Image: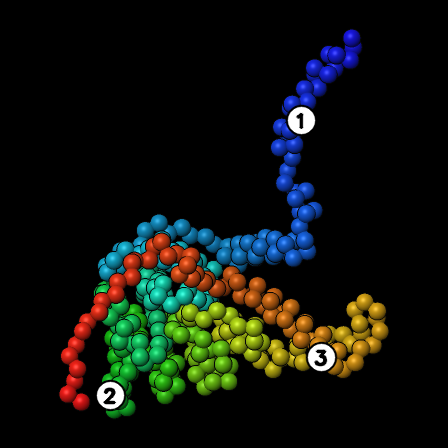
Amino acid sequence: MLGKPDSQESEPEEEPKALEELPPEPEEDFMNDSERIKMNLKNSSKIYYSVTHTIQEEIKTQPQMIKGGTLKSYQMVGLTWLVSLYNNNLNGILADEMGLGKTIQTISLFSYLIESKGNEGPFLVVVPLTTISNWSMEFDKWAPEIRKIIYKGKKHERPLLAQHLKNDKFHVVLTTYEYILNDKATLSKVPWQYIIVDEGHRMKNQKSKFALTLGQQYQSAHRVLLTGTPLQNNLSELWALLNFLLPKIFASCDEFQKWFDKPLSKMHPLTNSKVSEKQAFELSEEEQLLIINRLHQVLRPFLLRRVKSEVEKELPNKIERVIKVDLSAW
C-alpha cells in the first residue's frame, strides 16, 4: 500500500522532461579531437575579435553623400567593419571576391568619415593603371561631392599636379603604383589619413620596390588593402601583409624568418631521443604549418572576406547580350 503512492508520485512520464532540461555540454564528449579544436578556435576567434574591435558603432543607413544607388546589406556590413577598424585605430584587408563592390565600400567609407567623423582626408588610393579610369567614374557616380585629384600624366605635367596638392582643397588622390615610386618625393610628404591599395596582393612580395617604398617611406594614420586573393600559406607573404598592417611590430623579415630557420627541438617529443637532421627538418616544416595557421588567426580580426556564393541572393541577375557585327574587310 505504501509503494503504490510512491509509484504515482514518481510519474515516469516526466523523466524525459528532466532530460531535455540538461545543458548541452555532454555533447562535447562525443566530439573527436578535430571537432573540439575547431569549436575552441571558433570561440577564441570571437573573443579575440571582440577584444580588438572594442569600440562598436552601428550604422543603420548609408552615408548621405552616396548618390549613385543603394548599398546592399553585405556592403553595409563591410562599411560597418571598415568604420570599426577606423574607430579602433586598426588597419585591415578587405578581401571580398571580385565583383562584390570593394570600390563602392571604399567610397562609402570616405563618405562616412567626411560627413559623420569630420575627417576630410586626405585619402590616398593606389590602383593599377588599367583601373584608374574606372575608379574615377565610380567616384563621380556614387559620391560626386568628394573632391579628387587624379595624379597621373607626363613628366612635364606632374609638377602642376604637385602644386594642386599644395594649394587646393581635396579629399582623395587617385594614383598608380608607378607614381608611388617615381614621385615619392612629392607624394610621401603628404600627411595621409588613409592609404588604400587596390589589388593589394602585390604587397605580398616584400622584396618589390613598390611594397618597400609604400610600406616604409609613406606615412598614414590608417591603411587598408583591397584584394580578391585569399591568404596563402607562405611565411614571407604573410610577413609582407603584417608589415604593411603593423609596421612597428613586424619590422624585419629576417627576424621573422629566424623563428622558422631552425627546429624548435631536436629531441623526439615522445621518446625524448635524438633525431636526425632530416627528421628535425621535417618537424620544422610541421611547426611552420602550425604557426602559419596561428598567423591566419592573428590576421582574422583585420580581414573581411565574402564570396559570391554567400551573398548571391543580393546580387543582380546576370544579363548576357549578344551583339552581332559584320566581318571586317581584313
Earlier-in-chain disc, 2 versus 1: 1
- Three-letter code for the amino acid on which mark 1 is drawn: Glu
Q: Quadrant of residue 292?
A: bottom right
Q: Residue shown at 53%/72% (left/top)?
A: 232
Residue at 70%, 16% in the rendered image: 9
Residue toward you, 28 or 94: 28
Q: Amino acid at mark 2?
A: Glu
- Residue 51 shows in the view: no
Q: What is the distance, in whole Å, between disc 3 and disc 1 at their CAs?
A: 58 Å
Categorize mark 1 by other alpha carbons within 10 Å: few (<14), some (14-19), many (20+).
Answer: few
**Mark whose residue sits in front, 2 or 3:** 3
The label on residue 15 is 1
Q: Are marks 2 and 1 in contact (CB under 8 Å)?
A: no
How dense is the environment of label 2, judged by Cα within 10 Å: few (below 14), some, or many (20 and up)?
few
Say whether disc 2 or disc 3 marks the residue closer to the N-terminus. 2
Q: Could you tell whether 223 is left or right of 115 in the image?
A: right
Give the distance between the C-alpha atoms of the residues marked 2 and 3, in whole angstroms. Answer: 56 Å
Q: Secondary structure at mark 3?
A: helix
Assess whether mark 3 and mark 2 are in contact (beta carbons under 8 angstroms): no
Tell me the quarter of the picture where residue 35 sits.
Answer: bottom right
Amino acid under disc 3: Phe
Name the residue furthest bottom: 156
- In this view, 57 is above or below 141: above
Q: State the quadrant of the N terminus.
A: top right
Q: Which-is-in-front pick, marks 2 and 1?
A: 1
Mark 3, residue position: 281
Query: Does any portion of residue 289 appear in the rendered image?
Result: yes
- Residue with the mark numbered 2: 157
Q: Determine whether, in the image, residue 26 is placed left or right of residue 170.
A: right
Q: Quadrant of the C terminus?
A: bottom left
Left or right? Give the position of 116 relative to 84: left
